[in-house]
Amino acid sequence: MTAPTELRVSKDRRMLTVSFRDGERYELSAEMLRVLSPSAEVQGHSPEQRVTVPGKRDVAIGRIEPVGNYAVRIVFDDRHDTGIFTWTYLRELGEQREERWQSYLDELAEKGLSR
């Protein structure tokens, strides 16, 4: 997977735009990135351990740190900073944004949680 040509955080820090060499460009909300973080804290060590993270509607991106040539660590303003977002994962989130977001909203509703 080739690295994005650009990662741009919006002025309000609530949106990350990821652009790839093939022309694909995805806008990913800070909230979605936070609740779908690839960290063990969110994903667990197996599907059964995955955590539904509520209450992140107002989360913002504090900063982005490069991790080798394959990923970035996104540090959120709620201090969550353990997710390593690989180029592949960022592309998957972009390509599957609608389905993944709807699944998240469905999980919240199922568990009686709110954004």
Image (tube, grey):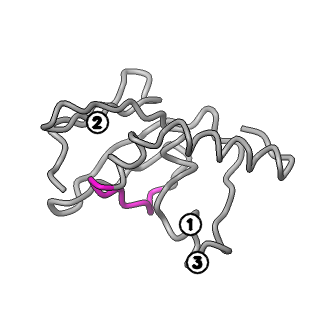
Q: Is residue 76 left or right of residue 42?
A: left
**65 or 107, which lies in front?**
107
Is 6 in the magenta? Answer: no
Q: In the picture, residue 20 is in which quadrant? A: top left
Q: Residue 94, how many percent across, how many down? A: 39, 40
**Quick one: label 1 or label 2, which is nearer the N terminus?**
2
Q: In the picture, residue 27 is in which quadrant? A: top left
**Quick one: label 3 or label 2, which is nearer the N terminus?**
2
**89 or 95, which lies in front?**
95
The local secondary structure at tag 2 comes to strand
Quarter the C terminus occupies: top right
Amino acid carrying label 3: it is Ser
How crowded pointer 2 is (Cα within 10 Å; few <14, some 14-19, many 20+) is rated as many
Dot 1 corresponds to which residue?
Answer: 43
Amino acid carrying label 1: it is Gln
The residue sitting at the right extreme is 112
Q: Is residue 72 left or right of residue 49?
A: left
Q: Is residue 49 left or right of residue 91?
A: right
Which range is magenta? 81-88
Q: Measure the alpha-carbon separation of dots 1 and 2.
A: 22 Å
Amino acid carrying label 2: it is Val
What residue lies at 63% left-to-right and 67% top-to-bottom?
A: 50
Quarter the N terminus occupies: bottom left
Dot 2 corresponds to which residue?
Answer: 18
Q: Residue 43, how many percent across, how many down? A: 56, 66
